[in-house]
């Protein structure tokens, strides 16, 4: 059971009011949303800065959508919905990234190949060179934390903007061209 502090009838004393915990399905959805947002930003940044090789990879609609469109969708979704982001939840994305790193090692050990028949899914994640692969996974974990910090900052910016617009609307000040705001 969680508690929130609310002002009591007697302003000198505060009391605790019981609040139902967040349902499990909502918590799972929240974690999945956090992971998807963080990974979208990291996939775009890492792919275009480290993985993309113009001699191997074509710049076509599919490549742009898979390695860039995902970030645009998640950025739009992040700015238009009231999903909360918490700094401590960066661990969800880092955990998912580490799971993918372990998966890629198992895939390599089982003889898996990329679409061209190479033993490494990506050059940077070549388990024939384990030091390089572990370094890449560690670097991705750091980038995931940075991506989560960006997403959390955008969430705070969105919330501040919503509060500012709501205060202008409630005080009768004009807020041109903005649709009605919903409360969180």
Image (cartoon, rainbow, N blue to C red):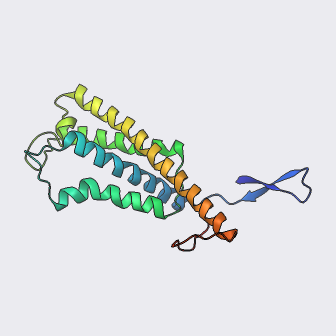
Residue drawn at x 31%, y 57% is 70
Above-or-below relation of 105 to 168? above
In the rendered image, the quadrant that contains the C terminus is bottom right
Identify the residue at the far top of this view: 131
In front here: 123 or 41? 41
The residue located at (55%, 51%) in the rendering is 156
Relative image position of residue 110 (x, y in whole percent): 18, 41
Closer to the camera in the image, 100 or 93:
93
Q: Is residue 32 left or right of residue 156?
A: left
The quadrant in which residue 51 appears is top left
| Figure disc tally | 0
Residue located at (43% from left, 39% from top): 145
In the picture, which quadrant includes the N terminus?
Answer: bottom right
Name above or below for residue 109 compared with residue 30. Answer: above
Q: In percent of the image, x 28 and y 30: which residue is there?
A: 134
Which of 65/93 is in front?
Answer: 65
> Is residue 86 depicted above or below 19 in this figure?
above
The part of the image, by quadrant, that contains residue 21 is: bottom right
Residue 11, x across and y down, in percent: 89, 54
């Amino acid at each position: 059971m969680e508690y929130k502090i609310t002002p009591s009838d007697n302003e000198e004393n505060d009391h605790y009011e019981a609040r139902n915990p967040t349902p499990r399905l909502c918590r799972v959805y929240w974690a999945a949303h956090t992971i998807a947002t963080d990974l979208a930003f990291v996939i775009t940044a890492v792919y275009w800065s480290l993985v993309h090789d113009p001699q191997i990879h074509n710049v076509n609609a599919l490549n742009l959508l898979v390695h860039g469109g995902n970030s645009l969708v998640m950025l739009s979704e992040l700015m238009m919905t009231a999903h909360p982001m918490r700094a401590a939840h960066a661990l969800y994305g880092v955990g998912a990234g580490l799971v993918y790193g372990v998966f890629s090692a198992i895939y390599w050990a089982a003889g898996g190949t990329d679409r061209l028949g190479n033993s490494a899914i990506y050059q940077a994640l070549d388990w024939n060179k384990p030091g390089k692969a572990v370094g890449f996974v560690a670097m991705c974990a750091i980038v995931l934390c940075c991506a989560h910090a960006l997403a959390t900052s955008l969430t705070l910016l969105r919330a501040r903007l919503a509060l500012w617009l709501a205060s202008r609307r409630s005080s009768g000040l004009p807020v041109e061209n903005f649709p009605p705001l919903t409360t969180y």
